[in-house]
Image (cartoon, grey):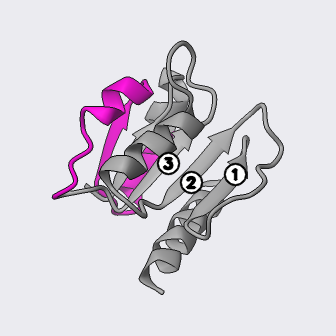
Amino acid sequence: MDILLVEDDDSVRDYLYEALVEAGLRIEGCGSAEAAMNLLNADHPPNVVVTDINLGPGMDGLAFARAAREICPGLPVVFISGRYSELRNMLPQERFLPKPFTTTALLRAIEDVRAAVRV
């Protein structure tokens, strides 16, 4: 899998899933951090995680990213949110996109975090 997409809003997740598939990426989509944790595998990690910060009840996207990196150290993450306008103290392999954003901006953020890990 290229991208692990974690978004609790079904319509947003479906839209992003389709947009990323159209861009030629292999996607696995989940509606919660807990479901996404079940897909993480240290032997075959996703290339990038795209996660909403506000995921409803349970673990939020920030906590998910921390937990995911315990399984897959250095995992690149693109955070998305309609409630936050920015994030501070981000790692080099992290990007933030406030909603709404364009597919082009998301693809650019994915490439940026991939490149940060390759350096």
Disc 3 and disc 1 in contact, CB within 8 angstroms: no
Residue at mark 1 to residue at mark 2: CA–CA distance = 7 Å
Q: Which residue is labeled 3 in the image?
A: 50
Q: At x 73% / y 42%, what residue is drawn? A: 100
Q: At x 25% / y 55%, what residue is drawn? A: 1
Which quadrant of the view contains residue 91? Answer: bottom right
Magenta stretch holds residue 44 = no
Magenta residues, start to end: 16-43
Q: Amino acid at mark 2?
A: Val
Along the line of sight, the residue nearer the viewer: 68 or 77: 68
Q: Which residue is labeled 1 in the image?
A: 97
Residue 78: numbered disc: 2
- Closer to the N terminus: mark 1 or mark 2? 2
Q: Is residue 101 visible?
A: no
Q: Using residue 69 as the reference point, say whether residue 58 is left or right of it.
A: right
Residue at mark 3 to residue at mark 1: CA–CA distance = 10 Å
Q: Residue 8 in the image: state x and y as whole percent.
A: 50, 23
SS class, disc 1: strand
Magenta stretch holds residue 29 = yes
Residue 79: numbered disc: none
SS class, disc 3: strand
SS class, disc 2: strand
Q: Residue furthest top?
A: 57
Label 2 crowd (10 A; few <14 / some 14-19 / many >=20): many
Q: Residue furthest bottom?
A: 119
Which quadrant of the view contains residue 82? Answer: top right
Residue at mark 3 to residue at mark 2: CA–CA distance = 5 Å
Disc 1 and disc 2 in contact, CB within 8 angstroms: yes
- Closer to the N terminus: mark 3 or mark 1? 3
